């Protein structure tokens, strides 16, 4: 391979480091109205009276929306394919507010100060209602988060708002009870994960204006421009043809921008006033009024034999989706479907999950998307089983985990449109990952622990994980390639690069397939008017799904060049060779450079534009895998944990760009360290999120992480572009369970509720 | 976010003081970092940055830190590095990042008597006085307890030079978070001085612990593990330790014992 | 408030509201490398230099800067290009939103400690949060940059 599997620099890299004006707020016209949202101070309330008259009188205020002057139509903000699995349970504005931070009124004014002053002048009288704040009892709680009758679910997901249930996910294979009874050892443990924040550095933001045809243009920091167009059309009740969504550079997303959120407000203002309008979320708005990782609780029961063979796994899951059901079903499902196939040799497995409404910040998408939560629970339970059996955790993995060429009916069962033929995991390199990880962390030498001083002990722990590569038979991507008159190509994709380097990777794939240099590919992404459809940057799909679409487009382009070359040389296509630089006629040994050829066919001969489009939807599960190994140091006196080293061995098939893949892994591991040790979420008793800023919600700093070592398994996935699978999400999943087991091995304390703060460990050691 | 009606930048302390008492709500601007966290409406903001209060001066018997001296200045000061094992610099090292420390001021910190403060704990273990522009000089201990009786300007802190050895200890989970507890200890000849802060209440002297250690040391000339253990029990009992999101009172008590022992071990 | 200040070597006379923060002033003037990441002075994304010191532009009032000198990434283009290239070589300019603030902090580090240890690098950059890169690659890039500039292992700063 010439271009693929090479560590090219990001094609937009130098512009980024030089601080060029490329992000949403940099591009907004200075004349845009500033939009601000009045947000609920109550976790649950009914708006009895809302008076905007004083605010409207304030000079510079352009318009104000409340639920009283806006149409009522349920929709979901979740960025998913239509029809969405998320219930239509949100209104642009509503009489009820369902969490602290929920939207009450929208103000547009000439500048920020005026808009903020106007917010203060809006008088709202609330009937404060008793909120639902405990998700573990939400289902039995007589208080309903969604008492209204006009909300609904498109698909049968178990939507039952009369019991605060947003959805249920159930699947089973074999007879769990029976097999459990036959097992020699059965352990059952409960684990909880916190609602982690995405914490991308650029907050949500969008601006809008009308184009020359009077259509609404929304420029937004989004992961999902095409879903955003559809969702906006639905919510605003205008045809999608009247909307164009443009995504410039994005300052990180991590799932936060897989839910449409800020975009509605300026759009409403522009539609009403005809003027450009913008909104930039404050960090506190991001925390209080967008989404988080779903907090989940799992009870995992594992049955095994004394020799370490796992025979049955039963998982009961409860997910807190907060005030709205955005991504509730898909994250909950992923917590089982993309976790349990790791142990493909079991005789019986069952997953029963429920996602409930509460009056808390809504759950949503976050890198790892439910799989992170599920992996923490299952891998912790397997580690506990290993301890119970007095067995090395790597050995219990070796006996039970899925290996190259194997499968489980679970995969077909949980894959849409899978059909009867078993899907074999031909590219699975887990075996290698575990072996290599053991070497790098010096497992044989150090496991389970060693003392470094009277009060400090180091322990080792590990875990394995998988994710998906796109969503089979659901999420599709398309790519268009255009040959230009100087022999360079446009690659138009609807895929959205969140900073991961996706555009670079797609350009590498295009260059490889076309046989040209990377510099000859000019990428444009993404703009719903100009680029072909793509479901967006989520479900670890861009490299795999869009990458395959790019290959198809490029293959077609080569065919077009050859066909056109045949016309040019007046011969049959079979006689034409395109080597990336020249179009060669093998019959006559004549050749013409691609640059001359494209000039000629544009200006002089043929007068034709070559343009091809490829599209792709995955048909098969092609999960990436990873083994993660942690070495931690526990201070026995204070309970403080330091990560000494984290080793991640990742099987992502061919890394299209090894350098960028490595950074994906390092970044994901650090997010996992945050989840494991630092990112504590606290609510006040009235339902107000206390940790709603970076001083109280601590993402890891560069001094909080220890050494990180990443390597790739030499794998190749036949269905992936040049053998690639995904990488963006799998890298988060092993971290928390590996660290928790390392803590256990160091000091005997098992933390079953994240994060593992020093005080929790100290308590377990002392109380 | 700051909300300021009127802004003045006086050139002298007297002028600043006149502004301060000219109206209710008149507010002095230090590094503005803490002010920026609030949503207070400030009718008159008085910028102290032109009043010549940014200095670290060494006199014959004292070191003076002007109110507008930043933590960054403290961290990089050659003068401070020569005294007290550089405790003041070490106490501020872990506060968020250098970009913040280059802004936040000695005056804003001490005047506000923040419970979580690392700097105040370190200052307090030294022989420190504060000079309020109108009301004069007070012992830091008195000032921390009573604050200022009336609106005033903290002009400087004055630290008596002596050859005490000083140690600062703090427990944080994430670097860049507030401390869950901090402790400063000084050894002055055969005497110990101990201050505990971020309890989460204001930094306070552990008088009983000090007395116990001083007596034991005077008698035995050493501090056995047994004595350290007893000292830990005393410190946990004599001060009040509260609970907040960062830690419970029991945990803080335990941390006080641990930090005390570690600090003593460094000066013995 | 009328304020006279120098930004990236050029004089400006500006009329700004008394509570305008430097971040806003700079963005209004088109210095888009300066960005906001939080409202609590915690993220370092907004880092610029005032009189040669790294500070948070979200926390400094513009009024206060009468007679002072401000430098943003746009004012140190050559250094941005050089350091930036090392970051790009490691692939750690992911979303890139934090990169300008990071580079301003690296320049300040270099000024304070031209031959820093790893620990000093981490200390000086701890106030620059990044959610994408995982930090490790940034450390690799910075070390390579300093090595190339000052020579590997050489004790003497140039
Ligand atoms: C995000 C963040 C994290 C922090 N973390 C820590 C930490 O971990 N540990 C720690 O010890 N500290 C921490 N601090 C506090 C910081 O160190 C300062 O103590 C604090 O910001 C106050 O200093 P300032 O100069 O910013 O004061 P300002 O915000 O300017 O002022 C604070 C108050 O003091 C008044 N004031 C200012 N100067 C004077 C004066 N000379 N005389 C009288 N009154 C005056 C002001 O009117 C105001 O009421 C943190 C601060 C922030 C913003
Ligand atoms: S914007 Fe976060 S510290 Fe300035
Ligand atoms: S590169 Fe995205 S926050 Fe640092």
Image: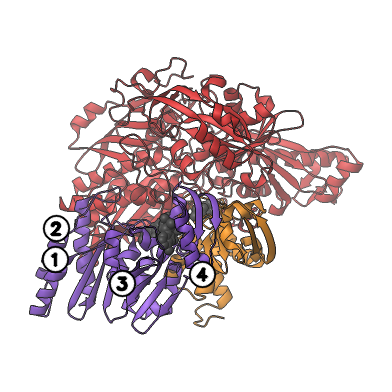
Mark 3 or 4, closer to the camera: 3
Q: Chain of mark 4?
A: C
Q: Residue at (50%, 23%) from the top-left corner?
A: A91
Q: Is residue A475 above or below residue B22?
A: above
Do the residues bearing badges 2 and 3 touch, measured as CB atoms within 8 Å? no
Residue bearing mark 4: C109
* Residues at marks 1 and 4 on the same chain: no
The colour with which the image depicts chain C is: orange
* Crowd tier of the residue under label 2, counting other residues whose Cα lies within 10 Å: few below 14, some 14–19, many 20 or above: some
Mark 2 residue's CB less than 8 Å from ligand 1: no
Q: Is residue A634 above or below residue A355?
A: below
> Looking at the image, which is closer to me, B147 or A599?
B147
Alpha carbons under labels 2 and 3: distance apart: 26 Å
Residue B128 bears which disc, if any?
Answer: 3
Residue A552 bears which disc, if any?
Answer: none
Tell which chain the image draws in red. Answer: A
Numbered disc 1: secondary structure: helix
Mark 3 or 1, closer to the camera: 3
């Amino acid at each position: 391979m010439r271009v693929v599997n090479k560590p090219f620099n990001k094609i937009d890299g130098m512009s980024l480091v030089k601080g060029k004006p490329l992000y949403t707020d940099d591009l907004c016209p200075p004349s845009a109205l500033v939009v601000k949202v009045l947000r609920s101070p109550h976790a649950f309330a009914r708006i009895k009276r809302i008076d905007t008259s004083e605010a409207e009188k304030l000079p510079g205020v352009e318009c104000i929306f409340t639920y009283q002057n806006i149409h009522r139509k349920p929709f979901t903000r979740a960025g998913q394919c239509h029809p969405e699995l998320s219930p239509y349970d949100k209104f642009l504005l509503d009489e009820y507010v369902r969490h602290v931070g929920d939207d009450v009124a929208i103000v547009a004014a000439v500048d920020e100060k005026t808009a903020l002053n106007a917010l203060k002048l809006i008088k709202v009288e609330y009937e404060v209602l008793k909120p639902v704040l405990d998700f573990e009892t939400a289902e039995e709680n007589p208080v309903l988060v969604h008492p209204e009758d006009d909300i609904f679910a498109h698909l049968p997901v178990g939507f039952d708002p009369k019991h605060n249930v947003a959805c249920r996910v159930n699947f089973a294979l074999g007879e769990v009870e029976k097999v459990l009874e036959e097992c020699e050892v059965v352990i059952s443990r409960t684990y909880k994960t916190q609602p982690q924040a995405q914490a991308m550095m650029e907050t949500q933001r969008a601006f809008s204006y009308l184009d020359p045809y009077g259509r609404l243009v929304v420029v937004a920091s989004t992961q999902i421009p095409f879903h955003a167009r559809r969702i906006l059309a639905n919510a605003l009740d205008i045809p999608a043809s009247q909307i164009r969504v443009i995504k410039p550079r994005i300052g990180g997303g991590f799932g936060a921008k897989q839910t449409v959120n800020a975009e509605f407000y300026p759009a409403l203002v522009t539609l009403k006033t005809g003027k450009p309008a913008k909104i930039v979320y404050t960090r506190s708005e991001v925390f209080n009024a967008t989404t988080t990782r779903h907090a989940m609780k799992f009870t995992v029961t594992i049955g095994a034999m004394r020799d370490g063979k796992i025979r049955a796994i039963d998982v009961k899951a409860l997910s807190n989706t907060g005030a709205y059901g955005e991504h509730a079903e898909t994250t909950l499902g992923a917590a089982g479907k993309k976790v349990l196939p790791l142990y493909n040799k079991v005789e019986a497995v069952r997953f029963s999950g429920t996602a409930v409404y509460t009056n808390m910040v809504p759950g949503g998408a976050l890198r790892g998307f439910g799989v992170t939560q599920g992996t923490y629970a299952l891998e912790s339970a397997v580690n506990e089983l290993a301890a119970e059996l007095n067995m090395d955790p790597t050995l219990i993995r070796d006996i039970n985990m899925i290996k190259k060429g194997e499968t489980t009916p679970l995969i077909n069962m949980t894959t849409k449109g899978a059909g009867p033929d078993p899907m074999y995991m031909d590219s699975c390199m887990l075996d290698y990952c575990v072996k290599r990880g053991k070497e790098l962390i010096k497992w044989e030498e150090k496991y389970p622990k060693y003392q470094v001083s009277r009060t400090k002990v180091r322990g080792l722990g590990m875990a394995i994980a998988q994710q998906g590569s796109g969503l089979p038979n659901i999420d599709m991507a398309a790519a268009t390639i255009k040959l230009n008159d100087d022999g360079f190509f446009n690659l138009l994709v609807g895929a959205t690069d969140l900073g991961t380097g996706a555009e670079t990777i797609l350009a590498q794939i295009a260059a490889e397939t076309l046989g040209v240099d990377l510099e000859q590919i000019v990428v444009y992404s993404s703009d719903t008017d100009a680029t072909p459809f793509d479901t967006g940057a989520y479900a670890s799909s861009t490299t795999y799904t869009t990458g395959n679409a790019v290959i198809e487009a490029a293959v077609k382009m080569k065919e077009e060049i050859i066909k056109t070359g045949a016309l040019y040389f007046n011969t049959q296509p079979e006689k034409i060779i395109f080597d990336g630089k020249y179009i060669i006629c093998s019959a006559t040994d004549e050749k013409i450079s691609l640059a001359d050829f494209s000039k000629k066919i544009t200006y002089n001969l043929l007068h034709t534009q070559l343009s091809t489009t490829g599209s792709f939807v995955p048909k098969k599960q092609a999960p990436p895998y990873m083994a993660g190994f942690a070495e931690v140091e526990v201070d026995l006196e204070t309970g403080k944990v330091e990560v000494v080293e984290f080793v991640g061995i990742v099987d992502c098939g061919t890394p299209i760009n090894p350098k960028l893949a490595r950074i994906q892994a390092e970044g994901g591991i650090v997010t996992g360290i945050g989840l494991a040790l630092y990112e504590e979420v606290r609510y006040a008793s009235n339902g107000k999120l206390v940790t709603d800023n970076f001083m109280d919600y601590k993402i890891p700093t560069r001094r909080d992480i220890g050494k990180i070592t990443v390597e790739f398994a030499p794998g190749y996935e036949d269905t992936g572009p040049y053998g690639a699978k995904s990488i963006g999400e799998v890298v988060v999943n092993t971290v928390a369970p590996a660290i928790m087991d390392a803590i256990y091995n160091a000091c005997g304390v098992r933390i079953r509720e994240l994060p593992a703060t020093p005080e929790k460990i100290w308590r377990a050691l002392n109380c | 976010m700051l909300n300021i009606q009127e802004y003045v930048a006086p050139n002298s302390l007297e002028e600043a003081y006149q502004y301060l008492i000219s109206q209710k709500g008149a507010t002095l601007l230090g590094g503005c970092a803490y002010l920026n966290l609030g949503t207070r409406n400030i009718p008159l903001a008085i910028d102290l940055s032109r009043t010549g209060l940014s200095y670290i001066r060494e006199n014959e018997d004292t070191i003076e830190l002007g109110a507008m001296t930043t933590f960054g200045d403290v961290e990089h000061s050659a003068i401070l590095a020569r005294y007290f094992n550089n405790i003041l610099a070490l106490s501020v090292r872990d506060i968020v990042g250098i970009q913040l420390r280059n802004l936040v001021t000695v005056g804003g910190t001490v005047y506000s008597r923040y419970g979580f403060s690392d700097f105040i704990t370190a200052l307090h273990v030294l022989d420190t006085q504060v000079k309020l522009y109108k009301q004069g000089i007070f012992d830091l201990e008195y000032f921390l307890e009573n604050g200022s009786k009336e609106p005033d300007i903290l002009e400087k802190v004055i630290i008596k030079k002596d050859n005490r050895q000083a140690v600062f200890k703090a427990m944080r989970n994430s670097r860049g978070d507030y401390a869950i507890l901090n402790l400063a200890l000084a050894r002055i000849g055969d005497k110990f001085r101990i201050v505990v802060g971020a309890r989460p209440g204001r930094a306070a002297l552990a008088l009983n612990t000090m007395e116990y250690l001083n007596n034991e040391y005077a008698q035995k000339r050493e501090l056995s593990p047994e004595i350290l253990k007893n000292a830990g029990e005393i410190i946990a009992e004599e001060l009040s330790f509260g609970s907040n999101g960062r830690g419970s009172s029991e945990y803080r008590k335990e941390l006080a014992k641990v930090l005390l022992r570690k600090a003593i071990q460094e000066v013995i | 408030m009328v304020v006279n200040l120098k930004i990236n070597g050029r004089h400006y006379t500006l009329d700004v509201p008394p509570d305008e923060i430097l971040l806003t002033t700079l963005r209004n003037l088109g210095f888009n490398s300066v960005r906001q990441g939080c409202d609590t002075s915690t993220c370092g994304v907004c880092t610029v230099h005032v009189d040669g010191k790294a500070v948070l532009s979200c926390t400094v009032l513009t009024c206060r800067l009468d007679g002072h000198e401000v430098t943003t990434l746009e004012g140190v283009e050559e250094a941005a290009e050089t350091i930036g290239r090392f970051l790009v070589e490691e692939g750690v300019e992911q979303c890139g939103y934090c990169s300008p603030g990071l580079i301003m902090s690296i320049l300040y580090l270099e000024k304070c400690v031209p031959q820093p240890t790893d620990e000093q690098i981490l200390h000086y950059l701890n106030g620059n949060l990044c959610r994408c890169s995982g930090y490790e690659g940034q450390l690799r890039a910075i070390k390579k940059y300093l090595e190339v500039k000052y020579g590997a292992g050489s004790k003497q700063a140039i």
